[in-house]
Image (cartoon, grey):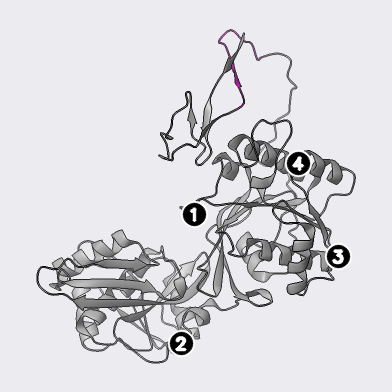
Amino acid sequence: MVKPKRRFVCQACGGVSLRWQGQCPDCAEWSTLAEDAPETVFSAKHDLSGGGRAFTFASLDAPVTLPVRRPTGLAEFDRALGGGLVPGSAILMGGDPGIGKSTLLLQAAAKIAMAGGDAIYISGEEAADQVRLRADRLGLGKAPLRLAAATSVRDILTTLGGMSAPALLVIDSIQTMHSDQIEGAPGTVSQVRGCAFELIRYAKETGAALVLVGHVTKDGSIAGPRVLEHMVDVVMSFEGERSHQYRILRALKNRFGAVDEIGVFAMAGAGLEEVGNPSLLFLSGRSEAVAGSAVFPALEGTRPVLVEIQALTVRLASGATPRRAVVGWDSGRLAMLLAVLEARCGLSFSSAEVYLNVAGGYRLTDPAADLAVAAALVSALADRPLAHGAVWFGEISLAGEVRPVAHAGIRIKEAAKLGFSKAHGPQAANGEDAPGLSYAPIRLLPNLVDRVMAGA
């Protein structure tokens, strides 16, 4: 027998509860639980073994034809995708409001249309005239791009079913779509899940590349049910600070390529411009050596990016509570590094305020940044500038050892290409010298302090 079952779904995190509560037990948000469509639960006596359709199995060595990727016309976008759009793929792109998601996708769709491909842009947030005005501002007003403003998935699929499948279909955004066959307002968990399923099924059956724009919550995660990220093939995040010029397109999940690849763009008056060499962007304005500044060769996927790490220490009067402020790095890792510097090197940061910043608003997650951060902290504490033509990289252990990191050779070659003459890092990378650059290995953290005090 089939039994109806009531359930309540959180509109913020997608958590499910069997009874209504004022506060979601999963994300602790208030007044976000809403009743979902009744769920049918089969009893133990229900038989599912008959009435289905048999299918055949395939072997692992069956011949496979690799899909031909379609370039978007934006090399940085293609890099983040792994080489271009895969026919029949579903892509979910999230980012803060106003960061440039719609602008980027409008540029990509227009370039595909101008290259002879069929591209469709459907907006659920703006009227067609508003999108047209943005295209004129970007200089894309003459592109043969098909544009529509619609929010009904039934209407969209009916319209698309009467024409040949496009090369690219952009839905901006999935939270504004709704289906009259699903209960709930647009943006609810059931609506987002159901509408995304129907659109993804259309993409798989026709071979159209589908891009879904997703809203984000206040903590930066994509709004709606987490199952949405499992349903799509690629999850991308468009990041950046509004006060800074640059934007980073990052692949968080990619079934057709490597993850952690990034594309770098700069916001200009005529839209998003590609940045072929991000290191020059993040190191711009760095004219002379100052205390507390160190250059770190970061690695995003297969792309090396040189960034500047800035540190500042301020001595306080006795009894005052020092502050620790971090922008662009993990505050917990900074606390660990300060403890190691105090325990292994005898440096006292307990009576000083510490401020750490990654220039340009860049965010670092690479553990190889430990040595560069330590060098900047020691330089700021001693008020001694580091050598202007040096880069620093290496992971620091709790014992004060400088441990090896991945792809040291790529980091060193990028530093040499930009004119740096010296690299400081772990001993394991001692044989990775590049033309015009000398490598100085560091084994223990006290050796770093000696090198900074000597002005290396």
How far apart marks 3 and 4 lie (CA) works out to 23 Å
* Callouts 2 and 4 close, C-beta under 8 Å: no
The location of residue 416, given as percent across then percent down, is 46, 84
The residue to which callout 3 is attached is 144
In the picture of the structure, the residue carrying the numbered disc 1 is 220
Q: Which residue is mark 4?
A: 153
Chain-order first, disc 1 or disc 2 = 1
Residue drawn at 72 percent across, 63 percent down: 106
Relative depth, front residue between 452 and 268: 268
Is residue 147 placed above or below 396 in the rendered structure? above
277 or 430, which is in the foreground?
277
Query: What segment is highlighted magenta in the picture?
Result: 37-49
Q: At which x and y percent is residue 8?
A: 52, 28
Quarter of the figure that contains the N terminus? top right
Q: Is residue 39 magenta?
A: yes
Residue type, numbered disc 2: Gly
- Mark 3 residue type: Pro
- Label 3 sits on a secondary structure element that is loop
Mark-to-mark CA distance, 2 and 4: 49 Å
Looking at the image, tell me whether mark 4 or mark 1 is earlier in sequence order.
Answer: 4
